[in-house]
Amino acid sequence: MSNLIDKRYEFVLFFEVENGNPNGDPDAGNMPRIDPETSQGLVTDVCLKRKVRNYIDLVTADKDRFDIYVRENAILNVVNEAAYKAQGIKPETKKLPKDADQAKLIIEYMCNRFFDIRAFGAVMTTEVNCGQVRGPVQFGFAKSIDAIVPQEVTITRMAVTNEKDAEKERTMGRKHIIPYALYRAEGYISAPLAKKAGFNEEDLDLFWQALLNMFEHDHSAARGRMSSRKLVIFEHATALGNAPAHRLFELVTVRRKDETKPPRAFSDYTIEINYDAKPAEITIIER
């Protein structure tokens, strides 16, 4: 495949939430996820990948190359079986083809068809086995810059569910919100893994677009107002990289302008990038 990426990347994404729940925890009554020791808010890598998938699925018309593997209501065995049919190979239960070339064809088909497999990888060892792919694009958990204070808001519904409750006229409910928080997510893109998965420059451009626009098509009352605010990209000069990732992440710092009051807007923060400490082989791209 042409135009495979040949450089390593790291990135930092800042996004905000206002009066919403960015990533509820089903084990805690769907309250916003939180670090119990620091009270900082958390958003999982899986949540962020889901939003990238949804954006790519929305904006790309070429489903032969930009289809999404992990999607709502997908039956993975059926999807996997399509790879075998396309290659004219009969699947064996829970096994890849014994012939190495045939097994390679199955995995390549899945990578070529599905954006999220090329980007994030996938474990496709279901009853119809399509192997495993380690994706070049990986996120860590996003973490809020400051401690958050989740609020429980009581809401009412003018309708009732059951006939026996008709005399109540209305029912009560609750939702959890964060008044405001700025989150920081960090991620990595490996050129050697991109070569194996077929992740190319076009895929990379779409991924950057997704990070900047994924919340614009995901608005809901539960999530409040969520927006991507700043993307900082570190581009290395080589495939293996020219500086440790942690050193690059440390170049990006966030400062609250007024420590005497809680933050309630992006303008309450200043994001600074230390260009003076940047390694010479690294290019910083701000979006």
Image (spheres, rainbow, N blue to C red):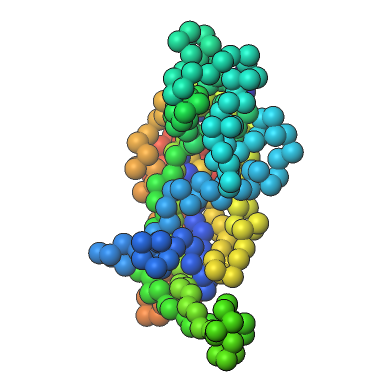
Quick one: which residue is furthest to the front in this view?
164
Q: Position of residue 165 (x, y in %)?
A: 55, 85
Q: Position of residue 16 (x, y in %)?
A: 51, 63
Give the residue drawn at x 65%, y 34%. 66
Give the residue drawn at x 42%, y 77%. 151
Name the foreground residue: 117 vs 196. Answer: 117
**Side (left or right) of 282 relative to 287:** left
Tell me: residue 7, above or below residue 220.
above
Asked which quadrant contains residue 62, the reply is top right
**Side (left or right) of 97 relative to 260:** right
Tell me: residue 133, above or below residue 226.
above
Give the residue drawn at x 61%, y 58%. 218
Q: Is residue 169 visible?
A: yes
Tell me: residue 179, above or below residue 237.
below
Q: Is residue 6 visible?
A: no
Tell me: residue 242, above or below residue 264.
above
Give the residue drawn at x 65%, y 56%. 217
Name the foreground residue: 185 vs 27. Answer: 27
**Could you tell me which quadrant the N terminus lies in?**
top right
Q: Position of residue 147 (x, y in %)?
A: 35, 69
Quick one: which residue is furthest to the left in this view?
37
Total marks shown come to 0
**Side (left or right) of 158 relative to 194:** right
Q: Position of residue 124 (x, y in %)?
A: 47, 30
Name the foreground residue: 277 vs 214. Answer: 214
**Side (left or right) of 237 relative to 244:** right
